[in-house]
Image (cartoon, grey):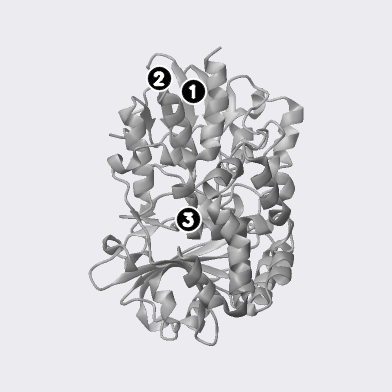
Amino acid sequence: MVTSTPLWQRKPWDAIVIGSGPNGLTAAITLARVGHTVLVLEAQETIGGGVRSAALTLPGFLHDVCSSVYPMAVASPVFSSMPLAEHGLEWIEPPLALAHPFDDGTAAVLEGSMAATTRTLGNDGEAYRRLFEPLVAHWQRLQGDLLGPPTRFPRHPTLFARFALRALRSASRLAMSWFTEPPARALFAGLAAHSMLPLEHLATAAIALVLGTTGHTTGWPIARGGAQNIARALASYFQSLGGEIVIGMHVDSLDSLPPARVILCDVTPRQLLQIAGHRLPPSYQRRLQRYRYGVGAYKVDWALSAPIPWTASACTRAGTLHLGGTLEEIRFAERAPWQNQIVAQPFVLLTQPSLFDPTRAPQGQHTAWAYCHVPHGSPTAMLDQIEAQVERFAPGFHARIVARSTMSPVDLEKRNANLIGGDINGGVQDLWQLFFRPSLQHYRTPLRGLYLCSASTPPGGGVHGMCGYHAATAARHELLR
């Protein structure tokens, strides 16, 4: 059982992990599995960081507070090595990973079947197959290199090089050069928009290629009973290994911690400065101060009287919807937040988990979750714009809203201190900061025994635990000295 009683009188720990997000829990598990004594400290009253659920609208309606769909979790090598099913985690795979509707009532889709996906892409179906089929065929070998630390030489260098030739391009340029018609271009643009970068930026194509490939391999599942069950399963497994968790314990200084041989911080560089800045050399402090955070998210959760009335029938079978129209519209919408601008038609990412998981809402009723990208820390409400985009592709949507909950970037940061300015990726993931986050040292800091294990380290944002795993692996070398 997770306890709220601090265990300050214990004998010294081998490791203390600050933060119980998926990376923090993975770091803790990685060390506990090999026999180390590990304590996890969580500031909030619930564990999980970005994988939490709550009744945000009405009793009986369960909403995911931050993340909701988990392609990278099921693709994660470290999660796959854990017996999480034995600890209560059950994945639900919607029939379609993704639907991308258009104004004419049609939709492009991403589903496990390559043939079914290409049939929605018209004359670009064959081009799509040629782009993704080699990645799908070699995904099991490729994913380890993509989710590995940047300092490690790829285990499959030829495959990795072939991927990089296309992945390091901008999504906009790759979509325009590879496809000739709007549906395929738009589908690719929507995938790339998960990068939270302008689509003209280099390496945005990488996000689209990875997410598209997972749609054909591991899928885009949701957790039965809500995202919180991911955190619960990780915590349960950790505790079965002898680990301990303390909730409601905000750490504002390393000086307040009990003795430990190593400390791993599931926090961003800004919080690391607050916690350990007085012990870090000035040059490293300056590097952390220069770390760049990206645009924010504005999120809406709905309690609904009935399913969303999508015009395109394919949308009723999809766990995730990309609402943004054409490549040109998405490109404009995703560039605006970087220019500190608000657009009337934002690109909206929406999930509808209750269609596939009846535990999320009372019988016959439903939940939905959506967000759009906004300028960093923006106070501007985007509810009307988001709901207008849903209504655009699902006329009659407004009439089915029973209650709603909104979260601005400021609200998101209040719920999770790692979401600086509403940035859900732990910092900008452009080409430079993708490989050098937050510094050339990655997980290590100049202070012996202190490590960073958050999404502000490689491979970056997403629920996969690999940041925590790599940090813990580095820390273990120190523990073995």
Of residue 59 and residue 352, the one placed in the foreground of this image is: 352
**Residue wearing tag 1:** 257
Please tell me the numbered disc located at residue 217: 3
Q: Earlier in the sequence, mark 2 or mark 3?
A: 2
Which residue is most to the top? Answer: 481
- Which of the two marks, 2 or 3, is nearer to us in this view? 3
- Which of the two marks, 1 or 2, is nearer to us in this view? 2
**Residue wearing tag 2:** 35
Marks 1 and 3 sit apart, C-alpha to C-alpha, by 43 Å
Q: Is residue 114 above or below residue 105?
A: above
Q: Amino acid at mark 1?
A: Leu
The residue at the point 46 percent across, 41 percent down is 22
Q: Position of residue 360 (x, y in %)?
A: 30, 62
Q: Can the viewer see residue 50 in this picture?
A: no
Q: Earlier in the sequence, mark 1 or mark 3?
A: 3
Q: Amino acid at mark 3?
A: Thr
- Badge 3 crowding class, 10 Å Cα cut-off, few under 14, some 14 to 19, many 20 or more, is many
Q: Amino acid at mark 2?
A: Gly
Q: Earlier in the sequence, mark 1 or mark 2?
A: 2
